[in-house]
Amino acid sequence: MESMLNKLKSTVTKVTADVTSAVMGNPVTREFDVGRHIASGGNGLAWKIFNGTKKSTKQEVAVFVFDKKLIDKYQKFEKDQIIDSLKRGVQQLTRLRHPRLLTVQHPLEESRDCLAFCTEPVFASLANVLGNWENLPSPVSPDIKDYNLYDVETKYGLLQVSEGLSFLHSSVKMVHGNITPENIILNKSGAWKIMGFDFCVSSSNPSEQEPKFPCKEWDPNLPSLCLPNPEYLAPEYILSVSCETASDMYSLGTVMYAVFNKGKPIFEVNKQDIYKSFSRQLDQLSRLGSSSLSNIPEEVREHVKLLLNVTPTVRPDADQMTKIPFFDDVGAVTLQYFDTLFQRDNLQKSQFFKGLPKVLPKLPKRVIVQRILPCLTSEFVNPDMVPFVLPNVLLIAEECTKEEYVKLILPELGPVFKQQEPIQASNMILLIFLQKMDLLLTKTPPDEIKNSVLPMVYRALEAPSIQIQELCLNIIPTFANLIDYPSMKNALIPRIKNACLQTSSLAVRVNSLVCLGKILEYLDKWFVLDDILPFLQQIPSKEPAVLMGILGIYKCTFTHKKLGITKEQLAGKVLPHLIPLSIENNLNLNQFNSFISVIKEMLNRLESEHKTKLEQLQIMQEQQKSLDIGNQMNASEETKVTNVGSQHIDKVFNNIGADFLTGGESENKEDGLQNKHKRASLTLEEKQKLAKEQEQAQKLKSQQPLKPQVHTPVAPVKQTKDLTDTLMDNMSSLTSLSVSTPKISASSTFTSVPSMGLGMMFSTPIDNTKRNLTNGLNANMGFQTSGFNMPVNTNQNLFSSPSTPGVTKMTLGTPSTLPNFSAVSVPPAGAKQTQQRPTDMSALNNLFGPQKPKVSMNQLSQQKPNQWLNQFVPPQGSPGMGSSVMGTPMNMMGQSAFGMQANPFFSPQNFAQPPTTMTNSSSATNDLKDLFG
């Protein structure tokens, strides 16, 4: 790797040194920058050819440099002869101006070290192309080393040399005297140009007379650079010391032979014995057969043989050679026409450019790019010719690589993109560009597309010509995938919409809708929903073609996998727009069926999607409801565990109160009826709940029993009064069998006393005085009194709730169902009352919860009044009375049973009760009839 770098470094250093040493100090360097050494040419390939640019204009040139070091071996007079010969040739070339002669752009300049002059840009000499690499930089450039001449290049190159000789012989009256591959230069465009007039001979006769060309005798003692190349020299130069225009034609024949034989001349000459060599050559030429010319194409073989004839008069002249059939090749004629294009008028040019697309495919790419393309782009300065030239340029662009397109073609197209005058030519240019838009977008860089190509498309959409608008709308979908999304969204789509809304042409409106439908797949879903679909409702036209275009856009959006229409859009905007359109009178049956088909598909999807959504919501609600119930049950079980002690105490005091106030026999009877009624009214869910409670009770039994906390009386003494006598006295009033209805004072109110923990208050304060308490049931009469009822509720805890113990829930009104037992049972009149032991309540206690420790009457008497009253409130969750509680019965109109307005405090909102009813209403009524009827 290091050796390669060193080699490269040495090469660059050597080339730089050569350039510096060769050109440094030459006046040419004042106006031109000298670049890389690219080729060699001239007599003996003595001239080095460099790339160069003019400093003032940056115009590309070729700099020919002759380094005087090459002739250091010669004596001074020989050096002078060589320099004079070289100067003469360049000076003669500078004076002559013709397309077939190398164009000199700066005359010869001499310095101490070199001779230099500048010409048009040059590729190489024909000798370099044919394999003679003398005086070239090492290594040889691949451009020259791998260069192969195409047939069309060879034909047209030889034709160009013939035309150049015709100019010299006919117009200038001059013999070149040294037509060789070294003196034929290929310029940058591939054209063959003549140089090397070192040995030219002008006619000595006046122009009106027959030209006569003096000839010098061959002097073998002169330096080789002072003599023409004998291998391409006519025999008469040496043998008869004469020359004429036919001598150049012989040289042309030898050049043609060398071109078709890889640069090898027809004869090799011994420069030391030139006369003997030419004598032998003359003999061979007289017997020249077709076998010696086998590599030359057959159609020109005879002409080459004539050019190599020993007799000069037999040789064709230059003008005759330009007319031989060999040069009538289509490619050669095309290239020849381009070279004379500047002489043609617009009509001739237009006819030629129209037929050019048929010829271009037959020509090699290098010839097209180097020779034809520059000629075509040069015509862009003529606005009238642009519509005829542009199709050919774009045809060439298709065969070019992206790099070649950007370098050679795109810079020339820039002004054409913006051309708007004349209008007719501008419209034609738009049509041509639109037809090749895919090519432009594929090979043009993004910046140029945004700055040059797309503005032209926008101009076409806004053009006054309907034909251009239609063509633009038809072509846009073909290259929509090549347009960047921001440009399409912000510039292209708005112009298509404007064209649709503002045009008076039905064809443009329909094509706008078709164009939008085809490019929907390149747009974003939400842009279509928010911008395209609302635009459809703004179209004023109701022609069938327009309506079908609208339907097509809706259908494409609806069925496209990437896009789609949401059900909200379908229900709110699309269907309300489509359904009225479907019944337009202009639609035929097939069009109507198309509308209905799309509408049905939309409705089906709308139904399916919304139904699926509702089903999912229902499932989610049910899952959430089940989770809430589970959370409530967990909270209820936790509450039961925390309140288990108080519930057992309540049950114990209920049992004690019942045993104390009633006889055992009636108690047992009522308990049996109650249990019978409960067993008959429990549902499956309730039984499952009871089973869970029994399991919980078993767990609690295994725990240590809860010990009731003994409360010591606290002053004042008023709070420790014993209410047992008062309760017993009130309960004894049940035996009075009174049927009178007690009157409630109008000033009676029901208030809540949170500090007492009670859910009701009597109209007068409670004290130690005895008062009568009317039970809601009359045992003897069998009907209910309309008074203040206090039925024993074994299902609802009036003074506590599952969430907050001690907070009262209360409902005024008659209980919907009545249990089969009363709080106080009175035996029939005359029945003998016997002392019985209290009824065993263990079975009932086991049913509702774990056994609570019993509390003695002394402990009962020491409790506070509100605590004592709580003992007669059944525990929460006990089955039996459903949701009935103590309260005043309410009728359907919100009135109490006493005819007074119900207190809003007792509205259901303030006292919500659990919905569970533990007894059946009809069965409870029957049991009441059996019990009291």
Image (cartoon, rainbow, N blue to C red):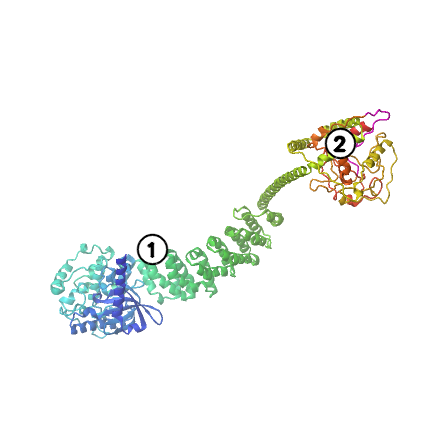
Which quadrant of the figure has residue 786? top right
Q: Disc 2 designates what residue?
A: 655
The amino acid on which the numbered mark 2 sits, given as a three-letter code, is: Asn
Circle 2 crowding by C-alpha within 10 Å: few under 14, some 14–19, many from 20: many
Give the residue number, with chain letter if any, for mark 1. 362
Disc 1 versus disc 2: nearer the observer: 2
Residue 356 locus on image (x, y percent):
37, 59
Image: 691 above or below 418: above
| First of labels 1, 2 by sequence position | 1
Residue 135 vertical placement versus 744 (above, below): below
Q: Nearer the viewer, residue 32 or 864?
A: 864
The residue under label 1 is which amino acid type?
Lys
Check disc 1 and report its element: helix, strand or loop.
helix
Residue 291 shows in the view: yes
Callout 2: SS: helix
- Boundaries of the magenta span: 813-834
Quadrant location of the N terminus in the rendered image: bottom left
Residue 931 x, y percent position in the rendering? 80, 28
Horizontal arrangement in the rendering, residue 287 relative to residue 878 (left or right)? left
Q: Residue at x 24, y 55 (%)?
A: 297
Q: Is residue 170 visible?
A: no
Q: Nearer the viewer, residue 172 or 522?
A: 522
User: Does residue 290 appear to the left or right of 574 in the view shown?
Assistant: left
Indicate left or right for 606 with 768 as reference.
left
Q: Is residue 821 magenta?
A: yes
Q: Quadrant of the C terminus?
A: top right
